[in-house]
């Protein structure tokens, strides 16, 4: 029988033979580590994919709740204690200093000023809304009111920049620019980002909606909704003489020459912006006329919005989102209309009357058309106002208005995957400071991006030696807001 072989029967391998047999293996182990290091180095040295420079649709990081945003900007800072954050304690202490002394934001304020407006509960949720917004209150079960917003300073300019661009001091890309950079736009014949601001630019002008160091394709197209006709809203939309075929030939020739010129000047963002603006302007001739022509809406629809500047721009915002525009910012009023340092009762009543019906009509239409689920609607200003009176002769105050307040204020959202019929967070009993679940503007931006399927920590752009993002190094997604 053959003899069974086992390990103990094999003669030991001499030391010299062992080293000879395994030396090449040891060498290859070392070579493998070197090759791996070389591969990692090559990967690190390889140029990264160029950032997107156009509005082509790009996939989100994960499944989105929303596909578009309508940001209604109540410019100047509406008073939260008169709109969406009722404070009964103000009536109890009316005309007296607050316990613990007077408040100070920009200036020392006066005595407690109770709200002259009555609050009522609405919808199945019982959400309290001021009498200033009876039409918006019909949608109470669709609203998420954040009562614990906070910003950094009580001044308009830095607070506008923080709310719109995520940085209070330096010029940074706006939220709309970041969103179109991340997702592109669903309609290549219209701008991806539109700013509707009546009567000219607001404080900080185009910095509120610019693309800054992002490619120029992502900045907003500014439209003045005080104009009525399509040709006034979108200047030079139609050539006064040339036929479309002749225009096409001229455009193709100009574009070919410009692209040849640009090929020798890579990286010049201003030139790139001009070329892309020309291309967009040409494409808009086929669709912008229809999108901006409000006369195409039925008379009863236009009547619901109202033939006012704010009514027309709210209807226009709906038409743009309906046609695939990604981000529409609607500025309410000229200048800083909500900045009520004096005569708050008259000012807020007038401003609410201007905006209440058009906003409710917008929400009505988005619900009717099945668009609210995929459209995030956001309302609010750059900060709130104090529960105490503006001191007479300060900033135009006469004892009947309120000063700026960044320590605590309210904003509301609807649609786009948020949890309606909810009041989130709280200010103190007088409405001065956020004390329960404070929400910084960075948190608002992080959650907006999340609803659109974008991770705010991954949506970055390399500039000046580091990666930038809308939320800088801050921000957290507030999952309690999600439906």
Image: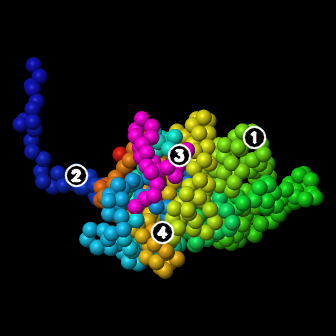
Judged left or right of residue 365, residue 387 is left
Q: Quadrant of the N terminus?
A: top left
The span from disc 1 to disc 3 (Cα, nearest Å) is: 23 Å
Determine crowd level at label 4: few under 14, some 14-19, many 20+ residues with C-alpha closer than 10 A. many
For the residue pair 472 and 258, the one nearer the viewer reads as 472
* Place of residue 125 in the rendered image (x, y in percent of width and height, measured from the top left): 40, 38
Asked whether disc 1 touches disc 4, contact meaning CB atoms under 8 Å apart, the reply is no
Q: State the residue lying farthest toward the left.
A: 8
Magenta stretch bounds? 114-135
Place of residue 44 in the rendered image (x, y in percent of width and height, measured from the top left):
43, 62
* Label 3 CA crowd tier, 10 Å (few <14, some 14–19, many 20+): some
Q: Which mark is residue 401?
A: 4
User: SS of the residue at dot 2?
Assistant: helix
| Residue position for label 1 | 299
At numbered mark 4, what does the secondary structure look like: helix, strand or loop? loop
Magenta stretch: helix, strand or loop mostly: loop
Mark 1 or mark 4: whose residue is earlier in sequence: 1
Q: Are marks 3 and 4 in contact (CB under 8 Å)?
A: no
Q: Is residue 115 visible?
A: yes
Camera-near label (4 vs 2) is 4
Task: For label 2, count other residues whose C-alpha is less than 10 Å away and answer few (under 14), some (14-19) or many (20+).
Answer: few
- In the image, residue 128 lies in the stretch drawn in magenta: yes
Q: Earlier in the sequence, mark 2 or mark 3?
A: 2
Q: Are marks 1 and 3 in contact (CB under 8 Å)?
A: no
Task: Between residue 471 and residue 160, name the one nearer to us.
Answer: 160
Q: Which residue is mark 2?
A: 22
């Amino acid at each position: 029988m053959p003899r069974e072989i086992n390990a103990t029967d094999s003669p030991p391998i001499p030391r010299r033979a062992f080293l000879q047999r395994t030396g090449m293996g040891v060498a290859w182990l070392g070579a493998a580590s070197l090759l791996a290091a070389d591969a990692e180095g090559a990967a690190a040295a390889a140029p990264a994919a160029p950032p997107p420079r156009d509005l082509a649709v790009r996939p989100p990081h994960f499944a989105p709740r929303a596909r578009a945003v309508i940001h209604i900007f109540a410019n100047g800072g509406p008073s939260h204690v008169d709109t969406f954050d009722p404070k009964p304690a103000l009536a109890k202490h009316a005309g007296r200093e607050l316990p613990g002394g007077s408040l100070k934001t920009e200036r020392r304020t006066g005595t407690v000023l109770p709200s002259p407006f009555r609050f009522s509960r609405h919808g199945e949720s019982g959400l309290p809304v001021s009498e200033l917004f009876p039409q918006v209150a019909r949608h109470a079960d669709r609203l998420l009111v954040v009562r614990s917003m906070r910003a950094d300073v009580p001044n308009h300019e830095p607070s506008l920049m923080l709310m719109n661009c995520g940085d209070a001091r330096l010029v940074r890309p706006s939220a709309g620019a970041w969103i179109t950079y991340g997702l592109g736009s669903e309609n290549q014949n219209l701008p991806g980002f539109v700013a509707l601001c009546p009567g000219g630019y607001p404080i900080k002008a185009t910095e509120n909606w610019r693309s800054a160091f992002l490619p120029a394709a992502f900045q907003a197209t500014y439209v003045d909704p005080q104009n009525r006709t399509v040709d006034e809203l979108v200047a030079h939309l139609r050539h006064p003489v040339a036929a479309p075929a002749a225009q096409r030939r001229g455009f193709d020739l100009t574009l070919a020459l410009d692209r040849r010129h640009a090929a020798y000047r890579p990286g010049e963002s201003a030139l790139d912006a001009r070329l892309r603006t020309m291309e967009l302007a040409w494409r808009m001739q086929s669709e912008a006329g229809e999108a901006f022509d409000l006369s195409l809406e039925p008379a009863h629809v236009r009547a619901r919005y109202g033939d006012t500047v704010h009514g027309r721009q709210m209807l226009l915002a709906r038409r743009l989102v309906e046609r695939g525009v990604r981000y529409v910012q609607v500025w309410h009023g000229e200048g800083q209309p909500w900045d009520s340092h004096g005569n708050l009762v008259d000012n807020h009543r007038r401003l609410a009357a201007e905006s209440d019906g058009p906003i409710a009509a917008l929400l009505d239409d988005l619900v009717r058309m099945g668009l609210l689920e995929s459209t995030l609607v956001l309302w609010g200003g750059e900060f709130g106002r104090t529960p105490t009176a503006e001191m007479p002769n300060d900033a135009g105050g006469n004892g009947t208005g309120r000063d700026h307040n960044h320590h605590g204020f309210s904003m509301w959202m609807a649609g786009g995957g948020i949890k309606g019929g909810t009041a989130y967070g709280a200010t103190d009993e007088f409405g001065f400071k956020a004390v329960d679940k404070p929400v910084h503007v960075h948190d608002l931006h992080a959650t907006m991006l999340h609803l659109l399927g974008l991770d705010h920590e991954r949506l970055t752009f390399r500039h000046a030696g580091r990666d930038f993002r809308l939320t800088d190094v801050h921000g957290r997604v507030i999952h309690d807001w999600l439906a």
